[in-house]
Image (cartoon, helix red, strand yellow):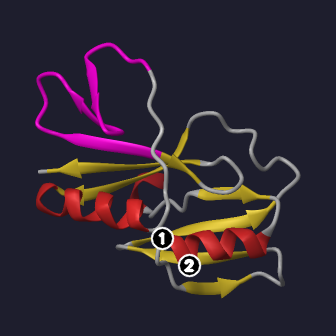
Amino acid sequence: MLSTYNPVPALAVKDLAAAREFYEGTLGFAAGETFEGEGLMYKAGAGQLMVYVSAYAGTNKATAVSFQVPADAFDDEVAALRSAGVEFQTFEMDGMTWDDGVATVSGMDAKAVWFTDPDGNILNLESSS
């Protein structure tokens, strides 16, 4: 069944050039396979991320992609995102506290941040044990 295959998150964007500037210039991804100017793939760990042009770009209001980062690398990744100009979002959620845009959940030894790409796709970085 499908559980044996790797999923590929797909992010809709309005402007592929602006998306490339963000994903490559800001986040440090290297472009992979391209789709005739309409999209491209990025390698991410053992998986991939697809960015493609769509009229529906910016309509998702939920987290689209989460990146699990080892706990000992989380703070460095957050610092690198900040130095690249990424601004973190905060929101209300029971049991969650915030410190300078970084969330912790009561009873868990994990931290997380949320941010958006130029089209409003919500990305998440969270620490893992």
Classify mark 1: residues with Cα within 10 Å, few (<14), some (14-19) or many (20+).
some
Proximity of marks 1 and 2: CB atoms separated by less than 8 Å: yes
Q: Position of residue 85 (x, y in %)?
A: 49, 62
User: How many marks can you see?
Assistant: 2
Give the structural element (helix, strand or loop) at label 1: loop
* Residue 1 visible in image: no
Judging by the rendered image, the residue that carries numbered circle 2 is 24
Q: Position of residue 61 (x, y in %)?
A: 64, 33
Identify the image quadrant of residue 37. Answer: bottom right
Residue 37 located left or right of residue 42: right
Disc 1 to disc 2, C-alpha distance: 6 Å
Judging by the rendered image, the residue that carries numbered circle 1 is 27
> Which numbered circle lies on residue 107?
none
Residues drawn in magenta: 92-114
Magenta segment includes 96: yes
Callout 2, which amino acid? Glu
Residue placed farthest to the right in the image?
A: 55
Nearer to the camera, 90 or 71: 90
Residue that appears at 74% across and 66% down: 52
Classify mark 2: residues with Cα within 10 Å, few (<14), some (14-19) or many (20+).
some
Residue 122 located left or right of residue 103: right
Nearer to the camera, 75 or 63: 75
Magenta segment includes 70: no
Residue 117 located left or right of residue 87: right
Residue placed farthest to the top in the image?
A: 94
Callout 1, which amino acid? Leu
Q: Position of residue 117 (x, y in %)?
A: 61, 56
Residue that appears at 52% across and 85% down: 30
